[in-house]
Image (cartoon, coloured by chain):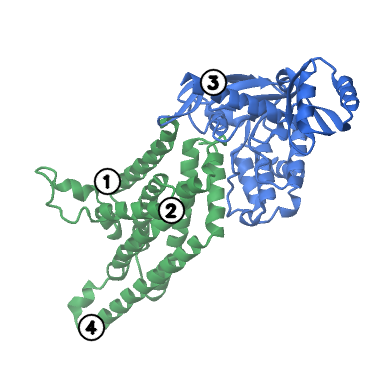
């Protein structure tokens, strides 16, 4: 694990001194703000109608009508943005030749991988944390259940961490950042939609595709439920891709 | 310090180095010399633990470069070819990262960074972005990161390539100063560099070691016959035949404009005889001097001998 902190700090300095972080951050908050605003506007419209309709009024719930769809759309926005955050991590080291420095310092592979992963995770966490403003704004005008909000955020955080692990792995496959981004975007999209058609697949395997889909496990979090199966799923996905990253880095030692 | 045994590396089916064997003792400065694509960088990359050999072993301080990479890297300062650096960092940020990565104690980081900045003359660019540094500064920064944490062994891959003459002198001076403290193994294809810096030279060509000795011994070995350069005013063909007839002269070549190059048998002092001969013949002797063999001659000799032998074998 040695050197994890050194790599982590270096990656953060690079993130904060290059435009990619500020650009992705700007567009993420712009999109997030737009979705939050439109959700609230729609909720507002329904509240007006509910003043004439007692049944509708009983169904009104800020969390279900504003935050649940918001979490869903934010997850999709991250699907697009995470490849941009991770594409640089290993591809650029290879392109610029700095991999030769990095891998001749007394650092372990895990130290390098975790340093890079945790730096990207912090960046992601920062972007996510800014959106807590939406929850604070809602809390100011209505009562909300913070437990459910945080559950949703936990889900988004884990989902993003899985995205990042996949993106980190893609970045080890090439020395071209664009190719790394395309690979991770393609894989993420595949893992996202693979659960759409539950009945697909050979006999006895129908549930399988839904189970491995990144989206289906996020659903429960956005409803405000923490299920250990979903926690386990995300931890497994994260570990799986970090493990592949490690194997990919090791391969340079036995490949001619 | 370094021990290499039967080190072989193939890139796919292309041979890069073939059964290298050599050892470098503590405190030596050794030059690794060879034409481009001779296998210098490959050898250094394997030593630095960046690449595995196809077969054979390389050990540093008794640690195997392949199976104990962390121990090896801990005692190593490595300047890769072309000096890759993090362009988005400032000089001090980069050195801080390097110091942390090399496990320098957090309280000692600042004095250690200040020391290498001063040693490499980088104090005035401390807060400059690496992307905007000149080539000379980048080279020095590459050296500075290698020096962090005072590694016992420095491996420098072409440390002076691409620098202007005054920068080359500076870097060489710096490497000379390092000699006391570190074992230095540096690759180059610039010959004067080796004769100035190194006490021992290993010459490699087409992946094989062709010579390993002190620069002085190598030039002496080649000096089986020594050479004289003369400038004489007179009829060229007559001069050539007359001089050739003298005993002890192996070869006379006219190089035009009255310049002649004579190959003389070793151990004979022929200069007085030659001078007399020229004056007696009524020509004018303008210049007569002994020519030393340079490392260039040794190098070219070894490299061409090698390829001729190979061509014959094929």
- Between the C-alphas of marks 1 and 4, the distance is 39 Å
Question: Seen in the image, is A157 located left or right of residue B180?
Answer: left
The alpha-carbon separation of the residues under discs 3 and 1 comes to 71 Å
Q: Please give the residue where the numbered disc 3 appears in the rendered image.
A: B309
Q: Which residue is mark 1?
A: A229
Q: Nearer the viewer, mark 3 or mark 2?
A: 3
Give whichever of discs 1 and 2 has the lower sequence position: 2
Residue visible at 23% across and 56% down in the picture: A193
Q: CA distance from mark 2 to mark 4?
A: 50 Å
Residue on which the image places disc 2: A177
Measure how far apart labels 1 and 2 are at the Cα level.
34 Å
Viewer-closest of B136 and B298: B298
Q: Which chain is green?
A: A
On the same chain, marks 1 and 2? The answer is yes
Q: Are marks 1 and 2 in contact (CB under 8 Å)?
A: no
- Label 4 vs label 3: CA separation? 97 Å
Name the residue nearer the viewer: B65 or B271: B271
Q: Are marks 1 and 4 on the same chain?
A: yes
Residue A27 point in image, percent of width and height: 42, 68
Asked whether B78 or B209 is in front, the reply is B209
């Amino acid at each position: 694990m040695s050197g994890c902190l050194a790599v982590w700090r270096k990656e953060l300095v690079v993130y904060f001194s290059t435009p990619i972080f500020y650009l992705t951050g700007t567009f993420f908050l712009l999109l997030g703000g737009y979705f939050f605003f439109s959700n609230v506007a729609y909720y507002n419209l329904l509240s007006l109608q509910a003043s004439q309709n007692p049944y509708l009024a009983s169904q009104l719930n800020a969390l279900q009508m504003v935050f649940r769809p918001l979490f869903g759309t934010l997850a999709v926005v991250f699907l697009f943005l995470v490849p941009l955050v991770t594409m640089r991590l290993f591809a650029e080291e290879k392109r610029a030749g700095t991999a030769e420095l990095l891998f001749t310092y007394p650092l372990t592979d895990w130290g390098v991988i975790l340093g890079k992963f945790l730096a990207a995770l912090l960046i992601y966490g920062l972007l996510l944390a800014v959106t807590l403003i939406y929850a604070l704004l809602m809390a100011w005008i209505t009562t909300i259940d913070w437990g459910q909000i945080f559950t949703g955020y936990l889900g988004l955080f884990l989902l993003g961490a899985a995205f990042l692990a996949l993106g980190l792995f893609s970045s080890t496959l090439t020395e071209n950042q664009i190719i790394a981004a395309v690979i991770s975007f393609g894989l993420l999209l595949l893992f996202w939609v693979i659960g759409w058609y539950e009945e697909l697949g050979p006999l006895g395997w129908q549930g399988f595709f839904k189970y491995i889909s990144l989206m289906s496990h996020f659903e429960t979090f956005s409803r405000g439920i923490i299920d250990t199966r979903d926690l386990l799923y995300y931890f497994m996905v994260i570990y799986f891709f970090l493990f592949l990253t490690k194997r990919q880095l090791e391969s340079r030692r036995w490949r001619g | 310090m370094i021990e290499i045994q039967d080190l072989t590396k193939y890139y796919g089916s292309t041979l890069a180095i073939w059964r290298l064997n050599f050892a470098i003792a503590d405190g030596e400065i050794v030059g690794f010399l060879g034409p481009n694509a001779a296998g210098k960088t490959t050898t250094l990359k394997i030593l630095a633990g960046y690449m595995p050999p196809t077969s054979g072993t390389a050990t540093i301080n008794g640690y195997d470069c392949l199976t104990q990479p962390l121990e090896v890297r801990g005692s190593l300062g490595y300047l890769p070819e072309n000096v890759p650096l993090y362009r988005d960092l400032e000089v001090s940020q980069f050195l801080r990262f390097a110091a942390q990565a090399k496990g320098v104690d957090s309280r000692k980081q600042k004095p250690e960074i200040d020391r290498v900045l001063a040693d490499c003359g980088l104090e005035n660019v401390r807060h400059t972005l690496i992307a905007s540094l000149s080539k000379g500064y980048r080279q020095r920064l590459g050296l500075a990161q290698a020096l962090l944490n005072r590694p016992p062994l420095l491996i420098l891959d072409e440390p002076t390539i691409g620098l202007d003459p005054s920068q080359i002198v500076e870097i060489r001076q710096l490497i000379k100063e390092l000699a006391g403290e570190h074992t230095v193994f540096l690759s180059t294809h610039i010959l004067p560099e080796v004769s100035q810096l190194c006490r021992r030279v290993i010459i490699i060509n087409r992946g094989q070691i062709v010579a390993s000795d002190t620069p002085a011994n190598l030039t002496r070995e080649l000096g089986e016959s020594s050479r004289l350069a003369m400038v004489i005013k007179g009829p060229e063909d007559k001069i050539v035949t007359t001089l050739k007839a003298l005993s002890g002269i192996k070869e006379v070549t006219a190089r035009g404009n009255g310049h002649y190059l004579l190959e003389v048998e070793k151990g004979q002092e022929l200069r007085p005889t030659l001078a007399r001969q020229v004056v007696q013949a009524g020509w004018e002797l303008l210049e007569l001097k002994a020519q030393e063999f340079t490392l260039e001659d040794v190098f070219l000799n070894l490299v061409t001998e090698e390829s001729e032998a190979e061509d014959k074998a094929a």
